Amino acid sequence: MNSIRKGNPVATPGMPAGIATPLGIAALGLLLGVGASPARAQADAAAFPQRTITLVNPNAPGGFVDIVARGIATVMQRQLRQPMVVVNRPGANSAIGTAAVANAAPDGYTLLLTSPAVAAIPAIDELFQRPAQYSLSQLAPLAQVTADPAMFLIHPSLPVRTVKEFVALARSRPADFLVSSSGTYGTTHLPIAILEQAAGIRLRHVPYNGGAPAIAAVVGGHATAVASAPSVAMAQVKAGRVRALASWGAQRVPAFPDVPTFRESGIDIEFTLWTALFAPSKTPAPVLDTLQGAVRAVVQDEDFKGAMARSLSTIAHLDGAAFQAHWQAEVKRIQASVRFIGKTAEQ
């Protein structure tokens, strides 16, 4: 019997200031188990796990985070000998699902698998001077699981073949360059902001509701360029509907051996679309240790390796001090990108 199922997506109109109302968070909290006492969590820690674990993906089904989440759950439930259920809680650029986990009982039974957007939300709330939907101190970093450089894709009609040519043309015709993304301040908007800042250019941003619609906008000629996960980009590049100009990786993406990195192209930037696991803060140390050990086993599992290879997702496991250092560096870089983007009409 397959214990992995999708939750019902939370309908939200966007990302207005009031999305994380006390009533809304309370309702999600009841669903995910908020309210269990710390004493109960400590009592359960020694025998953890004893029941189903919920893995929350704060994004819609079908994206790169969802692929990794379902791969993890399939294997991790075997490691822990308890069911692991993937629940999608999309909305507000991942803020709704993330806030629900941040406010869940710290007992290890509600976990978060997310992307770099997790670090952006508190900075966005600060930028707009509104109540924080959650703070990063409410989350305990467990492990990074995968990391893939974003790919920079352009419409094939654009008369450029190199990053240098793209930057020169963007400077001469800034009004003509529309860049699509999966959402303002989102995972595919942030690398564009990093490129703009490093290259000294400004591009017109058009947010869409997800990565697939964003790349479809470029395919259809409604946008000029987009940042995309390799798994999403592959089919469109192979079909010639978009052209891969560069990647934000430290090295070339194996699936795109002929596509240079931005560093090779003369712009010293890097950005990976990573996935990482988090638990509510104050989760007992023995529970965190058990979960981290299970993740170490997952990334060595042949079934998981095969699933990630088929989805063009690169396993890049980090935990302990290495992940803590990486996480802190990512928070600084992502929040700096949010401040560079500044306030936008979409918010």
Image: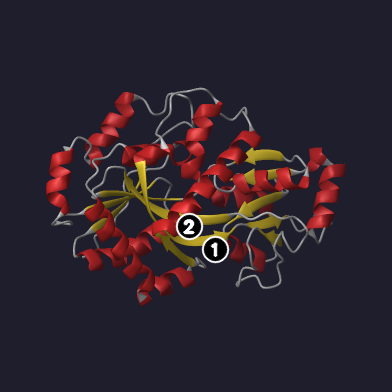
From the image, which quarter does the C terminus lie in? top right
Residue toward you, 158 or 323: 323
Using the rendered image of the protein, determine whether residue 254 is visible from the camera's viewpoint. Answer: yes
Residue lying farthest to the right in this orientation: 172
Q: Residue 64 carries which label?
A: 2
Residue lying farthest to the front in this orientation: 321
Provide residue 119's location: percent of width, then percent of height: 49, 42
From the image, which quarter does the N terminus lie in? bottom left
Q: What residue type is labelled 2?
A: Phe
| Quadrant of res 201 | top right
Check if mark 2's residue and mark 1's residue have beta carbons within 8 Å: yes
Residue plotted at (54% across, 63% down) = 231
Check disc 2: other Cα within 10 Å, few if <14, some if 14-19, many if 20+.
many
Residue plotted at (24% across, 39% down) = 31
Provide residue 81's location: percent of width, then percent of height: 19, 65
Relative to residue 279, is residue 347 depicted above or below?
Answer: above
Q: What residue type is labelled 1?
A: Ser
Provide residue 203's location: percent of width, then percent of height: 74, 41
Using the rendered image of the protein, determine whether residue 157 is visible from the camera's viewpoint. Answer: no
Disc 2 to disc 1, C-alpha distance: 8 Å
Q: Residue 231 carries which label?
A: 1
Helix, strand or loop at mark 2 = helix
Check disc 1: other Cα within 10 Å, few if <14, some if 14-19, many if 20+.
some
Residue toward you, 204 or 241: 204
| Quadrant of res 149 | bottom right
Provide residue 232's location: percent of width, then percent of height: 56, 60
Helix, strand or loop at mark 1 = helix
Q: Which comes sooner in the sequence, label 2 or label 1? A: 2
